Amino acid sequence: MSQIKIFDTTLRDGEQSPGVNLNQLEKLEIAKQLERFGVDRMEAGFPASSKGDFNAVKMIADTIKDTSVTGLARTVKSDIDTAWEALKGAAEPCLHLFLATSPIHMTYKLKQTPEQVIDTAERMVGYARERFPQVEWSAEDASRSDWNFLAQIIERVIDAGATVINLPDTVGYTTPAEYGQLFRYIKETVPNIDRVNLSCHCHNDLGMAVANSIAAVENGATQVEGTINGIGERAGNASLEEVAVALKIRADHYPYETGLKLNEIKRTSDLVAKLTGMYVQANKAVIGRNAFAHEAGIHQDGVLKHASTYEIITPELVGVNSNTLFLGKHSGRHAFKGKVEELGYNLSDEKLKEAFNQFKLLTDRKKEVTDDDIFTILTEIQTDT
Ligand code: KIV
Ligand code: ZN
């Protein structure tokens, strides 16, 4: 099995979803859960984009110690300097630099020649490496770029010190076969490509972001970028939980593994949905409300005889609790403690008492207290400390 790195961009590309605006504490809360979920790297934001995002990235970089933290920057010195100020406290600071390489973007957006684009990318990667131990360089709109040009610019930025090369399908235009071929071509053409991590980053405009990401992995990508619940710019990004579960369930076909704790999927998904206000569609793969529900009589009958008849993923694998323990105003401290532990928390007696009191207050207002409600209570209690 080869190990695939997971790069989460829920807090940057995900936050670019129209209508989503997370404050610093909300971003930090999600960052802590991403760390628990086991992502290899999280993109905390775009420090030069606003004071608020700078502060959020800094707070996350200073707090998260088990996961590498990165921030986005354009290929301009002021963005790189600002990103360094935000990220320098991180356990493994990484800069994510991007510059467009497609004829459409170079002509209409950048108004630069291909030679100017190579020169800028090379200089700014070199400048970033004077500080950052890790620099990811993204060829924005790679999937609509000339492959020969891509190979040239990638060779130059690797020589300038890039440690990760990302080939985004920025507008969700590619297909699995085509994207896979692009990765194979770059692997076979660029000298020293094996010195760096090769990353895929897919958008979902044609509904193929997950399939495209997996095709990239099959053709040499060593890192997958995406978001929780697939949120992101326009139709969103590749949904990380779908990529990870597909690799796991079809391990017979895909000899790759991730370091993600799959049983944290449900909790991570719920938290992101709650804080972004982007609720998950009921029929969404892996995590939708109906993903483990059976309606047709024949299906129900089959599942009662053996779950494997109509269920390829067990709810437990992704942290969906099949236990229907009802928590309400008649529940005692013992049941509450059991639920707290089941949610993965180990509280001191004092914190448990505080949480229990809040839970009791809530039961006066709500008939049934859900896992989500308890999770909110626990998160608030932990944030207080
Ligand atoms: O989709 C994209 O091209 C991006 C880049 C900034 C990497 O998000
Ligand atoms: Zn993107």
Image: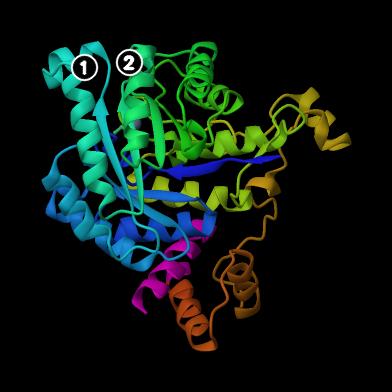
Task: Answer above or below: position of 152 versus 39.
Answer: above
Whether residue 303 is visible = yes
For the C terminus, give its image quadrant: bottom left
Magenta segment boundaries in residue numbering: 362-385
Mark 2 residue's CB less than 8 Å from ligand 1? no
Q: In the rendering, which numbered label is found on residue 263?
A: none
Quarter of image, res 151: top left
When the figure is inspected, residue 358 is found, relative to residue 75, above or below; the finding is below
Q: Main secondary structure of the magenta part?
A: helix
Residue 218 position (above or below residue 24): above
Horizontal side, residue 26 vs residue 212: left or right: left
In which quadrant is the N terminus drawn?
Answer: top right
Give the residue displayed 53% in from the left and 43% down from the top.
5
> Residue 167: percent from the left, percent from the top?
40, 26
Q: Amino acid at mark 1?
A: Pro
Which residue is drawn at the image coordinates 43% and 14% (left, top)? 174
Locate residue 253: give its quadrant: top right
Look at the image and name its color scheme. Answer: rainbow
Mark number for residue 149?
Answer: 2
Crowdedness of circle 1 by 10 Å Cα count: few (<14), some, many (20+)?
some
Look at 14% across and 40% down and name the residue there: 76
Badge 1 is on which residue? 114
In the image, residue 103 above or below residue 132: above
Quadrant of residue 301 within the rendered picture: top right
Task: Label 2, secondary structure: give it.
Answer: helix
* Residue 289 drawn at (x, y percent): 56, 38
State the image coordinates of residue 210 (x, y, percent, origin top left). Answer: 52, 26
Residue at (31% x, 57% y) in the render: 26
Query: Within the magenta stretch, is there residue 371?
Result: yes
Contact (Cβ within 8 Å) of mark 2 with mark 1? yes
Please state which amino acid type lies under the numbered disc 2. Answer: Phe
